[in-house]
Image: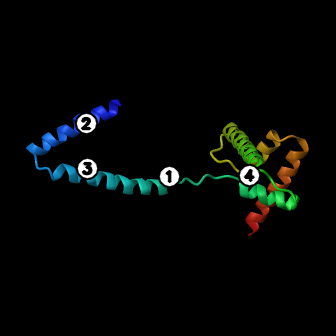
Amino acid sequence: MAPKAEKKPAEEKKTNVADKAPAEKKPKAGKKLPKEGGAAGDKKKKKAKKSVETYKIYIFKVLKQVHPDIGISSKAMGIMNSFINDIFEKLAQEASRLARYNKKPTITSREIQTAVRLVLPGELAKHAVSEGTKAVTKFTSS
């Protein structure tokens, strides 16, 4: 109720101001602002759609390679995506730490490989290193 009470005196003031100044200027400005705001709002809505980078597509592709007949729920997909982001962050931090220890400005495949050996346990690290080496070889050869 209070905002309505405030609006009524404001409208009365506008009529008083309209008597003193040309009435056409104020309503035109009032009409233009919402239209421009609406147009800007449409543009903002288009720009507001941020593309969120996820691993969901890749998780699904790997799942279909390993188990073609099994699906995955959206909750499970979200958990897998969080897991991959977490592992990526841990590897990046460890690789960064290794580069700093060695006073190198660049993180190379060697730092990544060492970070994988430090972060991942035993057999999993060996498989990850071999797959990573294979991927780097394939990338450099093509």
Query: Which residue lies under the disc numbered 4?
Result: 109
- Residue 30: image tag: 3
The secondary element bearing badge 1 is classed as helix
Q: Give amino acid for label 1.
A: Ala
Callout in the foreground (4, 3): 3
- Mark 1 and mark 2 lie on one chain; the one further toward the N terminus is 2
**Residue bearing the label numbered 2:** 8
The residues bearing labels 4 and 2 have C-alpha atoms spaced at a distance of 69 Å
Separation (CA) of disc 1 from disc 2: 35 Å
CA gap, disc 3 and disc 2: 16 Å
Q: Which of 89 and 133 is in front in this view?
A: 89
In the image, residue 120 above or below residue 53: above
Q: Callout 3, which amino acid?
A: Gly
Numbered disc 2: secondary structure: helix
Can you tell which of label 1 and label 4 is closer to the viewer?
1
Give the residue displayed 85% in from the left and 46% down from the top: 125
Element on which disc 3 rests: helix
The CA distance from mark 4 to mark 3 is: 60 Å
Q: Outermost residue toward the left?
A: 20
Tag 3 or tag 4, which sits nearer the N-term?
A: 3
Q: In this picture, is 18 found above or below 131?
A: above
Residue ID for mark 1: 48
- Of the numbered discs 1 and 3, the one sitting upstream in the chain is 3
Q: How crowded is mark 2: few (under 14 residues within 10 Å), some or many (20 or more)?
A: few
Q: In which quarter of the image is the C terminus?
A: bottom right
The amino acid at mark 4 is Ser
Horizontal and vertical percent position of residue 111: 74, 46
